[in-house]
Image: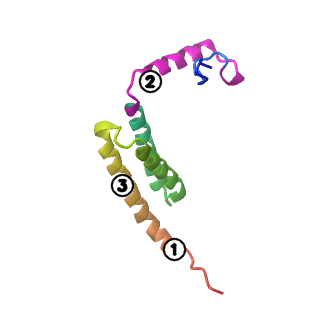
Amino acid sequence: MTASGIPDPTDQNLGGAEVDPAVADELAQVQNELASLAASVVVTNHAIGLFQLATIHLNQRPPQLNEAQVAIDALAGMLDGVEGRLGDDEPTLRDALAQLRLAFVQLAAPMADQEPELSDS
């Protein structure tokens, strides 16, 4: 734990479990690499991961719409939360989100037609 109370991923006793010194060194190296990057680069990378996750679920046969929706909503929430702060990549990410939403609607429509109608009786 750091002085600020934020967990330190390089702590030898992370979460109460003993961490191998080699693993702790590797974690420290990764942490230093991440610290050298602009946060917008890391967030953009995660946004791309969410886009890829959504497309994987949409491309299943049959499409896994509920799982895709989680990834799409997470991407939308992320982009809304950092609006205007992702630089040149932001318009591309917003276009990708729009494409995902369109694909979702196109895939969901035929599946909705196949669902049995509820009777009023």
The residue closer to the viewer here, 82 or 65, is 82
Q: Is residue 34 left or right of residue 15?
A: left
Identify residue type, mark 1.
Gln
Say which of 47 and 79 sits in front. Answer: 79
70, above or below 121, in the image: above
Q: Is residue 116 above or below residue 46?
A: below
Dot 1 crowding, Cα within 10 Å, few <14, some 14–19, many 20+:
few
Q: Foreground residue, 111 or 28?
A: 28
- Magenta portion: prevailing SS class: helix
- Compared across the picture, whether 23 is left or right of 86 comes to right
Vertical arrangement, residue 112 with respect to residue 85, above or below = below
Span shown in magenta: 14-40
> Is residue 51 visible to the viewer in this orientation of the structure?
no
- Residue 92 x %, y %: 30, 45
Q: Who comes first in sequence, dot 1 or dot 2? A: 2
Label 2 sits on a secondary structure element that is helix
Residue under label 1: 114
Pointer 2: what residue?
34
Give me the residue at 65% from left, 18% from top. 19
Query: Which residue type carries mark 2?
Result: Leu
Nearer to us: label 1 or label 2:
2
Q: Position of residue 34 (x, y in %)?
A: 44, 24
Disc on res. 49: none
Bin the neighbour count of mark 2 within 10 Å (Cα to Cα): few under 14, some 14-19, many 20 and up: few
Q: Could you tell me how far apart the alpha carbons at marks 1 and 2 are, in whole angstroms?
A: 47 Å
Whichever of labels 2 and 3 marks the residue nearer the N terminus, that label is 2
Residue at image location 46% in from the left, 51% down from the top: 72
**Residue 21 at x, y percent in the picture:** 61, 12
Mark nearer the viewer, 3 or 1: 3
Residue beneath disc 3: 98
Is 9 situated above or below 81?
above
Helix, strand or loop status at disc 1: helix
